[in-house]
Image (cartoon, helix red, strand yellow):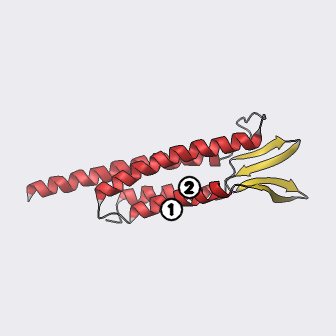
Amino acid sequence: MLQRIQSIYLLFASLVLFALFFFPLAHNVYVSGKPVTIMVTGIFQDINGAQQSTESFTALTAITAIAALLPLVIIFLYKNRKQQIAICYSAILVLIGYSFWMAQTVKKAVGSVQLDTHTMGIGLFLTSLSIVLLILAAKSIQRDEKLVKSADRLR
């Protein structure tokens, strides 16, 4: 059952979470009069035309990698759809908490500077997209479970 639509949703959810490593959470934010870029891996500052890390977010980086691998693990639990659904909803709760933690990390890094639409990066919205994809995957898994139960009744 790997070729089902929920596998595509889960794969895209994982890819979206891995994209957090490439897209900034906030960019061109002036902290102490210097423009910085905030990513899940840390705070980067433009020094002599090159991006150099000024602060590292080790825990956030590790949790991002684990959260991105979780939908891939769910794909290979296709033999147990009830467990797949439970882990899918658990992953949604984990991502909600992760999003809150990520937002608080950005707030702490920025300090008193107010973020607006010009300084927000794509990374702030990627976790929301992955949550939507996980919800779609859970609904598709439930639909498959209902189909299998109805086929069992006919036998």
In the displayed structure, would residue 50 be above or below residue 132?
Answer: below
Name the residue furthest front. Answer: 59
- Give the residue drawn at x 40%, y 52%: 88
Image quadrant containing the C terminus:
bottom left
Nearer mark to the viewer, of 1 and 2: 1
Decide if residue 134 is on the left or right side of residue 153. Answer: right
Instruction: State the count of labels.
Output: 2
Q: Say what secondary structure mark 1 lies in.
A: helix
Q: Which residue is mark 1?
A: 69
Where is residue 24? Give x, y as percent.
69, 51
Whether residue 128 appears in this view of the structure is: no
Where is residue 122? Give x, y as percent.
65, 47
Out of 65 and 15, give the one closest to the viewer: 65
Going by the numbered disc 2, the residue's amino acid type is Leu
Q: CA distance from mark 1 to mark 2?
A: 9 Å
Decide if residue 2 is on the left or right side of residue 68. Answer: left
- Give the residue drawn at x 89%, y 41%: 33
Is the Cβ of the residue at disc 1 closer than 8 Å to that at disc 2? no
Q: Which residue is mark 2?
A: 17
Q: Residues within 10 Å of mark 2 (few under 14, many from 20)?
A: many
Where is residue 22? Give x, y as percent.
66, 58
Going by the numbered disc 1, the residue's amino acid type is Leu
